[in-house]
């Protein structure tokens, strides 16, 4: 049975979307069938997905596939009790087989209202809001059941709003990307409590669905681990002292605060005392070059370095070799994340 996964942190700027896309490509390269569900109204991962197709450089050309808002809106407006997955057109990536997209939509920001109302009113006798509350989970699970996805990776924004909350509760597992700084440290102190409150509220809602014959969903995501992102090193070897300082502080608060409520719990086999399942160095210019061509960071081709060159020439020899080494290191770290998901 497939899994629904999200990379989430309530602080922005932690390379969440970039890592989600690259992890999706990595899993697809290992013969896993993967769906990216763009649940962030900013639609950044949708842009990454289609960046390899030059025909979509024109902003007036409509992107193929059903958007997440188009998929769910019939339920939001009350036209359907649930959504039939056969009505949804998912798009396959033109470079990476086994990788598909449920397209993002700027209008999906309207779902904040619909899902917010469902969150507040699903404990009442309002059947419309009860069905709205469970619609996203039902749709994602139907993709797994009928289209045999091994993984659905949901991209969400850094907010704690209604969309993010509903997505998180739909997930089987959560991975938390971090950067070693003060604000990530502060975010982690609160994150476990926030998710636990969501889980507790979900349990109350679920009890209020039963008398109406509406099946709920588990709503009990587990912590797969954390990723230490974007740390810089001296001479390619040692992390800067300031990063080590915040890394240690974040490590400590993960152990003391993240899973101490008894509701948001680690995945079986995950050692909370060793919370970093992967440590990803700052990839520098590799990320924007990869995004420009719609490729994974570990799949940049030598010819693509022309875009990073000041004179438009392709990198060779001792200039290209560090790129290869950084791509290989990045791919190795993605492998560690994939291993943790097994």
Image (spheres, rainbow, N blue to C red):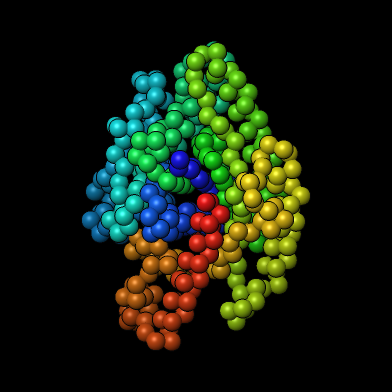
In the figure, is residue 338 to the left or right of 279? left
Q: Is residue 341 placed above or below 335 in the rendered structure?
A: above
Pick the quarter of the image with the N terminus: top left
Task: Give the residue displayed 70% in from the left and 47% down from the top.
Answer: 258
In front: 153, or 117? 153
Task: Give the residue displayed 39% in from the left and 87% down from the top.
Answer: 317
Percent x, y of residue 106: 39, 41
> In which image quadrant can residue 125 be found?
top right
Task: Give the residue displayed 60% in from the left and 82% down from the top.
Answer: 235
Residue 140 visible in the displayed image: yes
Percent x, y of residue 329: 51, 71
In the figure, is residue 89 to the left or right of 5? left
In the figure, is residue 99 to the left or right of 327? left
Percent x, y of residue 28: 39, 55
Which residue is at the far bottom?
A: 318
> In which image quadrant can residue 228 be found?
bottom right
Percent x, y of residue 240: 67, 73
Q: Is residue 166 placed above or below 29 in the rendered structure?
A: above
Task: Give the residue displayed 50% in from the left and 67% down from the top.
Answer: 332
In the figure, is residue 45 to the left or right of 338? left
In front: 293, or 298? 298
């Amino acid at each position: 049975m497939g899994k629904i996964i999200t990379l989430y942190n309530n602080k922005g700027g932690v390379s969440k979307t970039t890592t989600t896309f690259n992890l999706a490509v990595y899993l697809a390269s290992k013969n896993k069938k993967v769906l990216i569900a763009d649940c962030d109204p900013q639609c950044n991962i949708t842009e990454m997905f289609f960046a390899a197709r030059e025909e979509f450089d024109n902003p007036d050309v409509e992107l193929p596939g059903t958007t997440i808002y188009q998929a769910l809106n019939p339920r939001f407006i009350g036209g359907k009790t649930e959504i039939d997955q056969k009505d949804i057109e998912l798009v396959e990536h033109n470079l990476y087989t086994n990788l598909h997209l449920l397209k993002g939509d700027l209008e999906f920001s309207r779902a904040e209202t619909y899902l917010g109302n469902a969150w507040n009113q699903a404990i009442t006798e309002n059947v419309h809001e009860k069905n709205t509350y469970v619609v996203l989970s039902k749709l994602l699970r139907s993709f797994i059941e009928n289209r045999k996805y091994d993984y659905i990776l949901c991209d969400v924004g850094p907010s704690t709003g209604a969309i993010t909350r509903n997505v998180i509760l739909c997930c089987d597992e959560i991975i938390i990307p971090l950067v070693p700084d003060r604000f990530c440290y502060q975010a982690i102190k609160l994150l476990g409590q926030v998710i636990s409150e969501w889980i507790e509220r979900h349990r109350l809602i679920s009890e209020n669905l039963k008398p109406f014959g509406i099946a709920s969903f588990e709503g009990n995501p587990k912590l797969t681990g954390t990723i230490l992102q974007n740390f810089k090193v001296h001479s390619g070897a040692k992390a800067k002292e300031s990063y080590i300082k915040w890394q240690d502080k974040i490590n400590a608060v993960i152990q003391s605060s993240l899973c101490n409520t008894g509701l948001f719990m680690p995945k079986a086999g995950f050692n909370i005392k060793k919370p970093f399942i992967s440590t990803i160095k700052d990839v520098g210019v590799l990320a924007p070059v990869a995004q420009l061509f719609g490729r994974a960071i570990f799949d940049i081709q030598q010819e693509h370095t022309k875009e990073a060159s000041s004179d438009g020439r392709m990198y060779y020899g001792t200039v290209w070799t560090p790129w290869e080494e950084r791509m290989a290191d990045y791919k190795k770290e993605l492998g560690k994340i994939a291993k943790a998901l097994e």
